[in-house]
Image (spheres, rainbow, N blue to C red):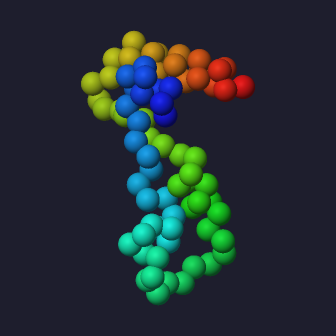
Amino acid sequence: MRFLDKREIGTRLIFAGNLLRQPAYLDMTHRSIGSLENSDFAMNNAFWIGVYPGLSPEMIAYVIDTFHKMVNELT
């Protein structure tokens, strides 16, 4: 996310992820099925990028190019 933020591509964490891990729900009686590992994965590894209808083709190309650069630096 820092890589994208430095290049002025807005990001946000996924809201909540696994709600059972959030402080407000720690002592709440609940029922869950399984380990909720997919919810944990989303909470720890996913994020949103900013989008809106006014993005031009050039802006979208910039975002795509920046993602390619990020992936190449990480691998």
Location of residue 35 in the rendering, given as x and y in whole percent from the top left corner: 66, 71
Q: Point out the image quarter for the C terminus.
A: top right
In percent of width and height, residue 73 lies at: 65, 21
Q: Residue furthest bottom?
A: 29
Q: Report if residue 46 is visible in the image.
A: yes
Image height check: is 35 above or below 2?
A: below
Which residue is found at the position 45% from the left and 50% from the top? 14
From this viewpoint, which residue is outermost toward the left? 54
Q: In this rendering, is residue 35 above or below 12?
A: below
Q: Is residue 31 above or below residue 54?
A: below
Tell me if I can see residue 60 in this picture: no
Q: Residue at x 67, y 26 (%)?
A: 74
- Tell whether 16 sits left or right of 73: left
Residue 27 percent location from the top left of the image:
45, 82
Q: Residue at x 47, y 26 (%)?
A: 4
Say which quarter of the image contains residue 11: top left
Instruction: Tell how many labels.
Output: 0
Asked if residue 49 lies left or right of residue 64, the reply is: left
Residue at 57% across / 61% down in the picture?
39
Seen from this angle, which residue lies furthest top? 58
